[in-house]
């Protein structure tokens, strides 16, 4: 088993390095691999590319996240913050001193990280004050209904919000029969694919909305793909859940007979609503909205100030019984905060190389290539910047500029292809949008809530698949065939 896990992980990492090496080799053709070169990006910005060996810290961090809990648990448990900060700090030092755009890239990444931790931290803490008790015992139909509801809810309050709100009651109703696949399918549906219908649902779609993609465009274009995928996954889940049996029924369900639904901490729903509304408090959404970044030159905006303030007030005024019922503690958000600061920093070189490759080779890319590249890289890199890089590349293929809101809207409505045999622009946008959101479920680091759900389950002493087991046992055999069918039916032109 250990050899199989190690082999699967080794193959995955080698594939990532090979892709990045291919990017770098093409971009640096005829020159030494570690020589700085200048490339033009879609926004008109020109900057130096990092050498391909700067991807090594990201690969090392990915390897350690995967193998640490398996092979050196005690060391990893005590020292993962040092590992993450150390590897991220090494990349930051290199960018700060040796890259001509390094300081700008680091500040931009810091802004993204603060926005990221403000959102997931606030949703995690606020949802901890909401205790939901469902009277029904976890059974295939009940669980499937909850997963379908969670998938829809993810489009209203985001994948992070829906995941944090529902994971505890989902685990509670299945107490005594919880298996690893229960957590995996929750991540598949509620933490990822469910959020594929609106810009609120998942960060890539929100960034597309900020760039000019109409709010309801994705709902209109992707609802049928979304619905088919969700139904198929729930069907597969029901087979697993039926085979899991009834398990041991806890005494709590006997005591709560007849009580369909109980909710404690209703006050926290007000704070949750404020957080969701604050997501849109951005100059790119509301023209003329104040920008603290421009006025005070700080790496956060009014949105983040509101989120942190609401989080503090919500925690101080939270229903204590609800917090105790949820067994709330800060360990899950602490681990995510440390690991993702390392991930955000170490993936800067990878995103630079990928972005440059997408821009310089966009004319060679078919819809299929955009779909598979966006998807595969969204599984191991942050899917939001990956989405933007390939959106910029696809727009460049049509002679459009991602920096223009009107150009993005025209691109979404459908620009005829410069090549008569090719498909219109909106098909490219659809392929990139679907891939960025759906493929985020491929690994625990593909989307922020994945790791949150994993950590919450581990805190509850639930058997959760390891990083590599999640990939080789669940995402590769279950998700990839479904995604291949989606490609064949909708994007194989």
Image (cartoon, grey):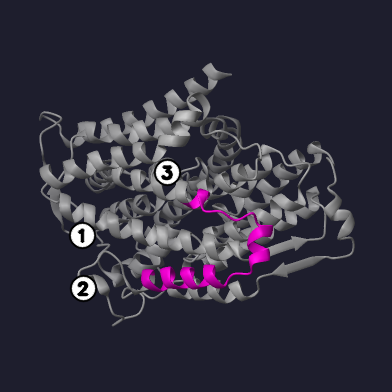
Give the foreground label among 3 and 2. Answer: 2
Classify the position of the N terminus by image quarter.
top right
Residue underneath mark 3: 368
Query: Circle 3: is it few (<14), some (14-19), or many (20+) Cα within 10 Å?
Result: some
Q: Is residue 356 above or below residue 60?
A: below
Q: Residue at x 27, y 62 (%)?
A: 402
Q: Secondary structure at mark 2?
A: helix
User: Which image quadrant for residue 27?
Assistant: top left
Residue underneath mark 1: 43
Q: Residue at x 82, y 53 (%)?
A: 137
Residue underneath mark 2: 296
Q: Position of residue 456 (x, y in %)?
A: 59, 48
Residue 279 can be seen, yes or no: no
Q: Position of residue 292 (x, y in %)?
A: 26, 74
Q: Secondary structure at mark 3?
A: helix
> Disc 3 to disc 2, how far (Cα)?
44 Å
């Amino acid at each position: 088993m250990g050899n199989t896990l190690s082999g699967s992980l080794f193959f995955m990492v080698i594939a990532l390095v090979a892709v990045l090496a291919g990017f770098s080799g093409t971009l640096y053709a005829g020159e030494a691999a570690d020589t700085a070169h200048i490339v033009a990006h879609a926004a008109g910005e020109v900057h130096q590319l990092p050498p391909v060996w700067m991807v090594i810290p990201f690969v090392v961090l990915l390897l350690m996240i995967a193998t640490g809990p398996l092979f050196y648990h005690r060391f990893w448990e005590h020292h993962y913050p040092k590992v993450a900060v150390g590897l991220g700090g090494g990349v930051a030092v290199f960018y700060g001193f040796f890259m001509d755009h390094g300081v700008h890239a680091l500040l931009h990444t810091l802004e993204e990280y603060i926005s990221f931790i403000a959102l997931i931290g606030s949703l995690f803490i606020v949802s901890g004050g909401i205790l939901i008790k469902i009277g029904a015992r976890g059974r295939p139909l009940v669980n499937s209904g909850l997963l379908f509801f969670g998938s829809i809810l993810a489009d209203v309050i985001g994948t992070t919000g829906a995941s944090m709100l529902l994971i505890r009651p989902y685990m509670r109703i299945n107490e005594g029969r919880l298996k690893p696949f229960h957590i995996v399918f929750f991540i598949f549906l509620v933490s990822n694919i469910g959020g594929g219908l609106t810009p609120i649902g998942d960060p890539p779609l929100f960034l597309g909305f900020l760039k000019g993609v109409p709010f309801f465009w994705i709902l209109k274009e992707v609802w049928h793909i979304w619905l088919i995928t969700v139904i198929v996954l729930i069907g597969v889940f029901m087979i697993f859940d039926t085979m899991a049996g009834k398990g041991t029924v806890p005494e709590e369900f006997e005591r709560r007979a007849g009580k369909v639904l109980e909710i404690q901490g209703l006050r926290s729903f007000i704070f949750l609503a404020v957080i969701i509304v604050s997501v849109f408090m951005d100059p790119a959404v509301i023209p003329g909205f104040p920008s603290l970044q421009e006025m005070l030159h700080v790496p956060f905006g009014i949105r983040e100030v509101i989120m942190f303030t609401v989080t503090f007030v919500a925690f101080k005024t939270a229903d204590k019984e609800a917090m105790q019922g949820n067994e709330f503690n800060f360990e899950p958000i602490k681990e995510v905060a440390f690991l993702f600061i390392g991930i955000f920093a170490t993936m800067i070189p990878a995103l630079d190389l990928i972005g440059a490759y997408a821009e310089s080779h966009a004319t060679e890319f078919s819809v299929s290539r955009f779909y598979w590249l966006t998807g595969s890289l969204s599984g191991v890199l942050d899917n939001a910047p990956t989405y933007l890089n390939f959106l910029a590349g696809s727009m460049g293929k049509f002679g459009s500029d991602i920096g223009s809101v009107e150009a993005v809207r025209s691109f979404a409505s459908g620009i005829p292809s410069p090549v008569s045999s090719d498909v219109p622009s909106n098909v490219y946008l659809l392929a990139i949008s679907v891939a960025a959101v759906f493929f985020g479920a491929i690994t625990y680091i593909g989307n922020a809530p994945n790791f949150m759900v994993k950590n919450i389950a581990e805190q509850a002493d639930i058997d959760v698949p390891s990083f590599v087991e999640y990939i080789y046992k669940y995402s590769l055999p279950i998700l990839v065939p479904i995604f291949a069918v989606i490609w064949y039916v909708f994007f194989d032109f």
